[in-house]
Amino acid sequence: MTEVLSAPLVVEFPFTRSLGPVQSAFLTGLRERTLLGVTTADGKVLVPPVEYDPATAAELRELVEVGTTGTVTTWAWNPHPRRNQPLATPFAWVLVRLDGADTALLHALDAPGPEAVHTGMRVRVRWAAERTGAITDIACFEPAGEPAPDAPAARPHDGSFADPVTGIVAEARLDYTYSPGRAQTAYINALSGRRTVGERCPSCQKVYVPPRGACPTCGVATTDQVEVGPAGTVTTYCIVNIKAKNLDIEVPYVYAHIALDGAGLALHGRIGGIPYDQVRMGLRVEPVWTEGGRYPDHYRPTGEPDADYDAYKELL
């Protein structure tokens, strides 16, 4: 039996968003070593602040300043910090209810070991040396060794700061080991030989490309391999006008669903060799392979007449 493939996989992208008045004030406050929350109609102080009451959906705008010390409400020990986590040495993830707040803030606690952490312990903010208006302006929490105050520390704040933060870019990243399984291993190995192989459901006879190892409709295993294509038909498509980071393809370009001949569903592929505004449903295309490529670089028109709509309407 062919060895099942396995490889590290990283999926990452920058998520850019603008900030409303509440989030803008909160993040700008972090830059200025000021912790802000928001007050609900029933007098509760939410930290981090939100723009709408999670219970009533009422708009929230009344900002208050809370303390830089607080109490751990719950925690979990992290013995093996990962890339870009707050601390490079083992630490505790903690929920901290800051003095004056009614909800807890999630962050890291710098502690020598799990025996040094407990629910109810007092902690204080350790500010980052350089602050830009992000949650990382709190470098971490550290043990405070002081009793909780008798009275809440929240006090009104107008949320005004010079040069407010109006937007953020969050770098999202998933870093894991992926195994495609038996069926997709066979599919990937066939692609290295410039062949496209699917698997047929023994019940409904649909050919799945890429194969999934089982028919999602009938719930039975698929083991009979079927070679499809190489040509196919464009069923639907979109025109991409925004250039992706680290992708060496000039915009605009077309990304399409392509039903390969003999397949029971369409797969994704880029369309090339034709102006983007001439791509259409029913266009007949074939794969283009690059030297040493393990999968088609793109698909180009075959020159055949367009497929009749009835021939691919069930594959839309």
Image: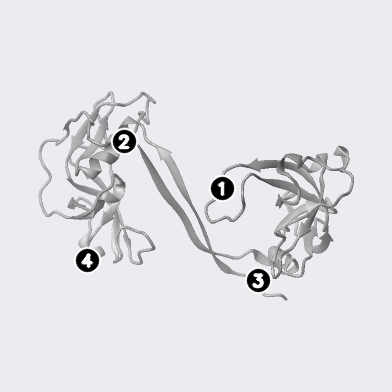
Q: Which numbered disc, 1 or 4, marks the residue that appears first in the sequence? A: 4
Of marks 2 and 3, which one's residue comes earlier in the chain? Answer: 3
Camera-nearest label, 1 or 4: 1
- Mark 2–mark 3 distance (CA, rounded to whole Å): 49 Å
Looking at the rendered structure, the kind of residue marked 2 is: Ser
**Residue drawn at the location 31% of the way across and 39% of the way down:** 165
Name the residue rendered at 19%, 44% in the picture. 33
**Image mark for residue 167:** none
Disc 2/disc 1 C-alpha distance (Å): 28 Å
If you read the primary sequence from the N terminus, does the residue marked by circle 2 or circle 1 appear first? Answer: 2
3D distance between C-alphas at marks 1 and 3: 34 Å
Q: Earlier in the sequence, mark 1 or mark 3?
A: 3
Secondary structure of residue under mark 4: loop
In the image, which disc is placed on residue 112?
A: 4
Cβ atoms under marks 1 and 4 closer than 8 Å: no
Q: Residue 99's quadrant in the figure?
A: top left
Q: Reading the chain from its start, which is encountered first: label 4 or label 2?
A: 2
Q: Which mark is residue 24?
A: 2
Nearer the observer, disc 1 or disc 3?
A: 1
- Cβ atoms at labels 2 and 3 below 8 Å apart: no
* Picture coordinates of residue 161, whole percent (x, y): 22, 34
